[in-house]
Image (spheres, grey):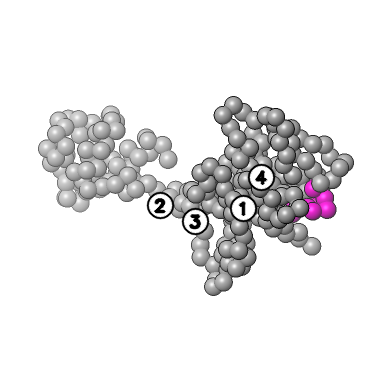
Amino acid sequence: MKFKNLQENLRRTLRQRIDEGELTGLGLAEQTGFKQAHICNFLNRKRGLSLDGMDRVLRVQHLSVLDLLDPAEINKRASMVPPAEEGFENVVLVDASVAATEPLIVNMDVKDMLKFRKKFLHGLRSETEGSRSDWERFVLIKVDARQGMSMYPRLLPTASVLIDRHYNSLKPYRKGEANMYAVNQNGECKVGYVETVSNQILLRPHNQAYPVEVIPLEDGKRVSDYLIGRICFVGVET
């Protein structure tokens, strides 16, 4: 929502209070310390209010910015994962770019929701580097055709993969077995095995018919900054 819309919603709220006899323009001017003409011009859309001015009006009228937001907008953007039935947890399915870049998943980005057993999710070991505590831990994405075939037969096109975004370490999850990762490459999500050489990440496919991708490390960034998370479950529709 734009600042202009917030001002309009404040104006509408004040005019409603005036129409209902709860408030007058003169009274609001006295409460805020503004001149009556200043308040009248605002109410009649002839001028706007500064941020400080809006704060003063909100304070004296016992309003919050939340009171000025459209409930539909709040619902659309609210972080939400509704509770699942007992013994299960809901995990959201999102676009790969959302999984790569958004710590918290908001309602407008949710494409679907799948149930996983709590016992399974809670039994997965995390291994974080840097700050990941504010990241929603588990998300699902569907891999595209190329990503799926590059990891064939471990993956297939349109497979759904569960990403543990609290596992952004290169430490093997199981001894002798390479982790499969979701990796952030310019805001997009790529999947593969990860190795490092000098200041580069090598993203290796399982299917040798596909090339190794090279991702240069930016100055000041670590490998863990590029690891969206470990792929800990693969679901294939049949």
- Could you tell whether 17 is left or right of 225 in the image? left
Rendered image: mark on residue 71 = 2
Q: Earlier in the sequence, mark 3 or mark 1?
A: 3
Query: Mark 2–mark 1 contact, CB under 8 Å?
Result: no
Residues at circles 4 and 2 in contact by the CB criterion of under 8 Å: no
Query: Which residue in the rendered view is the most extreme toward the top?
Result: 219
Select label 3 or label 2 by which is in front.
3
Q: Which residue is label 4 attached to?
A: 170
User: In the rendered structure, which segment of residues is drawn in magenta?
Assistant: 151-160
Q: Is residue 35 left or right of residue 231?
A: left
Q: Which mark is drawn over residue 80?
A: 3
Tell me which residue sits at (48%, 52%) in the image.
Answer: 79
Which is more toward the observer, 184 or 63? 184
Can residue 113 be seen here? The reply is no
Residue furthest out toward the front:
175
Mark earlier in primary sequence (3, 2): 2
Of tags 4 and 2, which is closer to the observer? 4
Image disc number at residue 164: 1
Tell me where residue 205 appears, x and y as whole percent: 79, 43
Residue 24 seen in this snapshot: yes
- What is the CA distance from the residue labelled 2 to the residue labelled 1? 32 Å
Q: Position of residue 11 (x, y in %)?
A: 28, 40
Rendered image quadrant of residue 170: top right
Q: Which quarter of the rendering shows the C terminus?
A: bottom right
Task: Measure the alpha-carbon separation of dots 3 and 2.
Answer: 15 Å
